[in-house]
Amino acid sequence: MSILKLHIRFTIRIGDLNENGLAAIRCRLTYNKNRKDFSTGITVHPDHWDPKKQRLLDQSDQEETTSMQLSLIENKISKSFLMLLGHSKMATTQQSYGKIVQRKAGDEMSVTNSRIHSDNKERDE
């Protein structure tokens, strides 16, 4: 029996700084050696990022808020992944990403400002 595990990592690309010198926090989903990478919409100063903890350093002004926002994204991804596994025998990273972002006509969702939100109210919740 194989273990079904989704790996969720938060990273920044130091080479891709915006005009203010901030780097976007990216989320990388890995499942069965397949990856999906997307931006969370959160930007941070690269000197305040701890790559081992995948969070901002404690001395940062926005550390508490950003850590909470990243935790919310991580929880939403985990919940969506578990729902996919419950509905099918095998899920893919693309399905997980699609379920999280749910790009359907009339109910478009996006990951923005470190929280996942919908332009329309979610019908299921």
Image: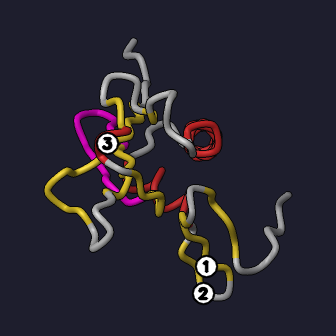
Residue 41 in percent (x, y) is at 47, 63
> Which mark is in front, 2 or 1?
1
Q: Which mark is residue 108?
A: 1
Q: Is residue 119 left or right of residue 113?
A: right
Residue occupied by mark 2:
105
> Which one is earlier in the sequence, the residue at label 1 or at label 3?
3
Residue ranking furthest to the bottom: 106
Q: Quadrant of residue 51?
A: top left
- Give the magenta range: 29-39
Q: For marks 2 and 3, give the CA distance.
A: 30 Å
User: Which residue sits at x=67%, y=80%?
Assistant: 107
Q: Quadrant of the C terminus?
A: bottom right
Amino acid tagged 3: Thr
What residue did someone put label 3 on? 11
Q: Amino acid at mark 2?
A: Ala
Q: CA distance from mark 2 to mark 1?
A: 6 Å
Give neighbour class at mark 2: few <14, some 14-19, many 20+ (Cα, 10 Å): few
Which residue is at a point 22% across and 51% down the rendered structure image? 13
Element under disc 1: strand
Earlier residue among tags 2 and 3: 3
Please name the amino acid that badge 1 sits on: Glu
Residue at position x 40%, y 52% from top?
A: 44
